[in-house]
Image (cartoon, helix red, strand yellow):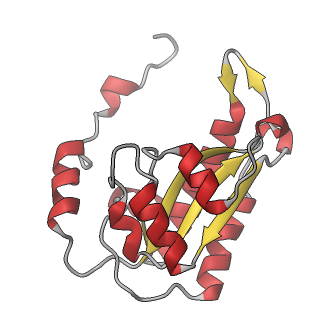
Amino acid sequence: MKLLELIQNRNSIRKYDSKEIGEQDLQDILEAGRLAPSWQNKQCWQYVVVQDKELIRNLALKSGMISKTNFFIKDAPVVIVACADPDKSGHMNGNDYYLVDVGISFQQMMLVAAEKGIGTCWLGAFNEKKVKKILNIPEKIKIVALSPFGYPAQKQGIYAKAVKMFAGSKKRKPLAEIVHYDKW
């Protein structure tokens, strides 16, 4: 599958099969993140790969911004928490580039996962203090995002369908609305 086709077909998965991810596939996913570009090649990212079922359950039930909003990650065989050390990146024009660095790296990981048939769902609605406590992440480290990684269940549940409809996941603005040539 060509990269653009892969990007067009990738979507957020909110219901996972119990099938484990092979070690080589997991290493390929992590390698994709490692190879990402970053601010002055400082590579500020750190990843916590959670495979322990009890830890995943704790994240699912205790990490949401509102109650148990992240409960759907409970069945994923892996949850990866994307972190950064802001001191190992840059700040320019009012932007903290650790967010960009980790965003690029994590997206590369998600694309390699998609290529292997492994589903993901970028999560930004989490309580950073709770996640840090559950996973013993140092105070100075920032959590940028987390995602379950796993094979999509054959049938997506009601929650997944409702969130997709609410979020309008497949709706994309046409290029004419977002691209400006030469001047705004």
Residue 27 placement (x, y as % from top left) = 68, 78
Residue 120 placement (x, y as % from top left) = 43, 64
- Horizontal side of residue 127 vs 32, given as left or right: left
**Which quadrant holds the C terminus?**
top left
- Horizontal side of residue 106 vs 124, given as left or right: right
Q: Nearer the viewer, residue 96 or 181?
A: 96
**Which quadrant holds the N terminus?**
bottom left
Residue 47 is drawn in which quadrant? bottom right
Question: Is 172 located above or below residue 33 in the figure?
Answer: above
Residue, x 19% and y 77% (percent of image)? Answer: 155
Q: Residue furthest top?
A: 183
Residue, x 16% and y 54% (percent of image)? Answer: 162
Residue 92 is drawn in which quadrant? top right
Q: How many numbered callouts?
A: 0
Is residue 13 in sight in this rendering? no
Residue 94 is drawn in which quadrant? top right
